[in-house]
Image (tube, rainbow, N blue to C red):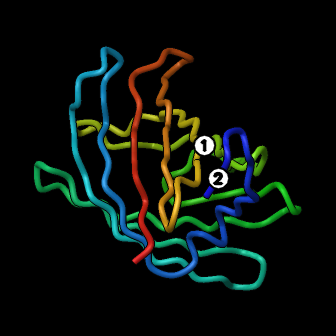
Amino acid sequence: MLQRNEQTNFDLLAYFEGRTTADGVFEDRKGRIRRRFTVEMMGRFEGNSLILDEHFVFDDGERQQRTWTLARRSADSFTGTCPDSVSEARGRLADGAAYLDSELRLKVGKRQIAMRFDDAFYEAGAGLVLNRSTVSKWGIRVGQVLIVFRKS
């Protein structure tokens, strides 16, 4: 059991190896839940990189698929790319958590809009990871994504 203010070593890339499931919500900047979703993920290492296949199902029936390549750069940093990324994502491991800054092109109606994601991942106990992602456009916060990941 963790004691108050105790920090653990947390390796996000190692966590996502194998099968992971998740449930999440997107809330707008006023805190109203706008979408719910589930995710099934499969991660595998190829050399120093984790290939992470994500399959999303949203409450309105929409389905999305994304494949990330997360490459370890040092013991405490990594980068990431996926087909809908605007630029290379930058990640770091620090203080028992993981952080990832990325910019993705998202389908909004019939348009593709670039949105910035500032993610924080926290180990939350036996096989659980919590993720909070602040979503912004032109520096203006448009909402946040909250996800709980589970290892089965």
Residue linked to disc 1: 102
First in sequence: mark 1 vs mark 2: 2
142 with respect to 73 (left or right): left
Expressed as whole percent of the image width and height from the top left, the position of residue 115 reads 48, 33
Residue at 87% in and 62% down: 75
Residue at 42% in and 66% down: 150
Image-quadrant location for residue 68: bottom right
Q: Nearer the viewer, residue 34 or 95?
A: 95
Expressed as whole percent of the image width and height from the top left, the position of residue 90 reads 72, 47
Image-quadrant location for residue 142: top left
Indicate the amino acid at tag 2.
Answer: Leu
Look at the image and tell me in which quarter the N terminus lies: bottom right
Indicate the amino acid at tag 1.
Answer: Ser
Whether tag 1 and tag 2 are in contact, CB under 8 A, the answer is: no
85 with respect to 106 (left or right): right
Expressed as whole percent of the image width and height from the top left, the position of residue 33 reads 23, 30
Q: Which mark is residue 2?
A: 2
Query: Can you say whether 82 is above or below 146 in the image?
Result: below
Residue at 64% in and 53% down: 2
Q: Nearer the viewer, residue 34 or 97?
A: 97
20 with respect to 70 (left or right): left
How many C-alpha atoms fall within 10 Å of the one at disc 2: few (<14), some, or many (≥20)? few
Query: Can you say whether 139 is above or below 38 in the image?
Result: above
Q: Nearer the viewer, mark 1 or mark 2?
A: 2
How many C-alpha atoms fall within 10 Å of the one at disc 1: few (<14), some, or many (≥20)? many
Q: Tag 1's secondary structure?
A: strand
Query: Can you say whether 129 is above or below 134 in the image?
Result: below
Work out which residue is located at the far right of the displayed protein and give it. Answer: 74
